[in-house]
């Protein structure tokens, strides 16, 4: 008799387990931010054929789940709203309620350790954390997981930006969000999905015969939020792909294309050019810098330079993350939000003209060229037809730099800051640093428009 009762109890447990309650992915939760000016998509899971009702504030929508139990309800786009509303999702006999939901702009921050790097690890941690109470900024930190197949959910929670919740949050993403919130006066949602030491391939959807570890981080850390509308992405990565040169440009182009398939073909993608570091192989870092600058030729991209932000060239993690985040915000404010008076970048190489013994270099974003230390311009080199570079004298003339060297009577090539360990002093009127370049076969973009080249 006891055996029969045990079997019946087991069957009842099995039946109960197959009758799933209505579920929402964790990206929907109290204190979240929904993306403004885009149709609002609420999605989740329940039993097949179950009727689902969603109420967001005063608006309702209904749907019936499909054969696999998935459902999605699209509500009307909304303007930014700093007054929290309530989200209720009802199924057959069960319901979920989330409160204090804002409408504003949602940005994803991704990459490796310099994106993951927390406020607690960065410069002036005590002061920054103490001042990090921003109730209209909301934080969502994706845990580090890899899977072989795309996942439906993440174990994470939206939190209000406050000294309690900011210490272990991405410093770059935090400072980016604070700048946007200050300039735009709208709620900002920040989703941190980053992993120290990661290559670019695990974040990519598309298979690449030459790639390693394709998709594992995308599957577990991006796929679950891929249906969730966002405004754009900021990216800080490249150290783990150091030895690949222009192949890195191709891999980043693939990643951007992949992510734009679900977040929109015009999704802004702003990234950081990695900082000088003594531990790289000779000449490898400038080649990666060129690959990163070449990504400026992709539409809707922007790049923040960091050669002036290094406190220790033996540390791959510069502590100054505030300037990094705010430089990324310059691109967003200018290109995404139309604040065209904001300068987006330091000087970027455009062309070189040979005038006798002089090489005259032209730059984009060159208004107010100067040196940040009032010393002569540093880190220029020239070479003749023999390709042997020597240190050069460089003088600012308006928005150009004139480069000469006594040893080279007929210059053929110019390069700037073309070393792993470098601290050049050339900046524009905003104090933003000039970006390393070589004039021969240069593939970098100028960032003058959102689409310099196809």
Image (tube, rainbow, N blue to C red):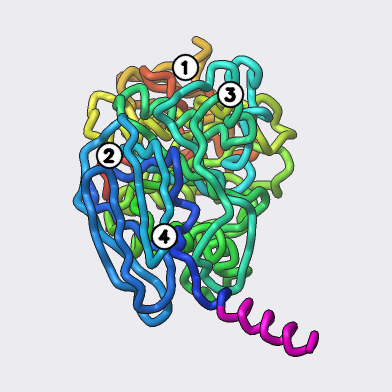
Distance, label 1 to label 3, CA atoms, is 37 Å
Q: Is residue 248 left or right of residue 126?
A: left
Distance, label 4 to label 1, CA atoms, is 44 Å
Which tag, 4 or 2, sits closer to the chain's start? 4
Contact, CB < 8 Å: mark 4 with mark 2? no
- Nearer the camera: disc 4 or disc 1: 4
Which tag, 2 or 3, sits closer to the chain's start? 3
Residue where numbered disc 2 is placed = 336
Residue at image position (37%, 64%) is: 91
Which tag, 1 or 2, sits closer to the chain's start? 2
* Most common secondary structure along the magenta stretch: helix
Query: Picture quarter containing residue 342?
Result: top left
- Residue 234 appears in the figure: yes
Segment colored magenta: 1-15
- Residue 360 appears in the figure: no
Distance, label 3 to label 4, CA atoms, is 29 Å
Q: Position of residue 39 (x, y in %)?
A: 23, 53
- Nearer the camera: disc 2 or disc 3: 3
Which tag, 1 or 3, sits closer to the chain's start? 3
Contact, CB < 8 Å: mark 3 with mark 4? no
Which tag, 3 or 4, sits closer to the chain's start? 3
Which tag, 4 or 1, sits closer to the chain's start? 4
Q: Is residue 397 left or right of residue 278?
A: left
Give neighbour class at mark 4: few <14, some 14-19, many 20+ (Cα, 10 Å): some
Residue 141: in magenta span = no
Residue where numbered disc 4 is placed = 226
Is the C terminus in the top left, top right, bottom left or bottom right quadrant? bottom left
Residue where numbered disc 1 is placed = 371
- Nearer the camera: disc 1 or disc 3: 3
Circle 3: element type = loop
Tell me the tag on residue 163. Answer: 3
């Amino acid at each position: 008799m006891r055996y029969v009762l045990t079997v019946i109890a087991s069957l009842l447990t099995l039946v109960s387990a197959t009758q799933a309650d209505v579920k929402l992915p964790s990206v929907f939760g109290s204190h979240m931010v929904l993306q403004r000016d885009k149709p609002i998509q609420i999605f989740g899971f329940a039993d097949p054929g179950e009727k689902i009702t969603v109420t967001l504030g005063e608006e309702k929508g209904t749907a019936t789940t499909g054969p696999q139990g998935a459902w999605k309800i699209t509500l009307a786009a909304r303007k930014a709203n700093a007054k929290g509303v309530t989200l209720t999702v009802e199924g057959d006999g069960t319901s979920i309620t989330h409160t204090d939901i804002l409408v504003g702009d949602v940005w994803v921050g991704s990459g490796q350790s310099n994106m993951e790097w927390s406020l607690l690890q960065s410069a002036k941690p005590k002061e920054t954390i103490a001042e990090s109470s921003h109730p209209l900024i909301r934080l969502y930190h994706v845990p580090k997981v890899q899977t072989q197949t795309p996942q439906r959910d993440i174990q994470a929670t939206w939190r209000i930006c406050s000294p309690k919740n900011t210490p272990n949050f991405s410093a770059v993403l935090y400072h980016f969000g604070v700048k946007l919130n200050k300039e735009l006066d709208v709620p900002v949602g920040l989703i941190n999905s980053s992993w120290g030491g990661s290559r670019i391939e695990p974040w990519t959807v598309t298979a690449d015969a030459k790639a390693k570890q394709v998709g594992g981080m995308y599957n577990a850390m991006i796929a679950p939020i891929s249906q969730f509308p966002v405004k754009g992405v900021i990216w800080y990565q490249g150290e783990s792909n150091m030895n690949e040169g222009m192949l890195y440009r191709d891999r980043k182009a693939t990643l951007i294309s992949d992510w734009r398939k679900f977040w929109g073909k015009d999704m802004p993608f702003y990234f950081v050019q990695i900082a000088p570091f003594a531990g790289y192989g000779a000449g490898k870092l400038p080649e990666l810098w060129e690959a990163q600058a070449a990504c400026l030729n992709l539409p809707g991209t922007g790049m923040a330079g960091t050669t002036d932000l290094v406190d220790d060239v033996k540390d791959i993690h510069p502590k100054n993350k505030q300037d990094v985040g705010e430089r990324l915000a310059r691109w967003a404010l200018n290109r995404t939000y139309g604040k065209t008076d904001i300068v987006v970048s330091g000087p970027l190489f455009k062309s070189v003209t040979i005038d006798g013994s002089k090489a005259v270099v032209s730059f984009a974003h060159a208004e107010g060229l100067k040196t940040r230390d009032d010393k002569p311009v540093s880190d220029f080199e020239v070479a003749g037809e023999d390709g042997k570079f020597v240190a050069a004298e460089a003088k600012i003339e308006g928005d150009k730099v004139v480069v000469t060297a006594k040893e080279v009577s007929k210059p053929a090539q110019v390069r700037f800051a073309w070393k792993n360990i470098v601290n050049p002093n050339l900046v524009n009127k905003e104090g933003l640093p000039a970006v390393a370049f070589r004039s021969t076969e240069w593939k970098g973009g100028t960032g003058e428009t959102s689409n310099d080249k196809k």
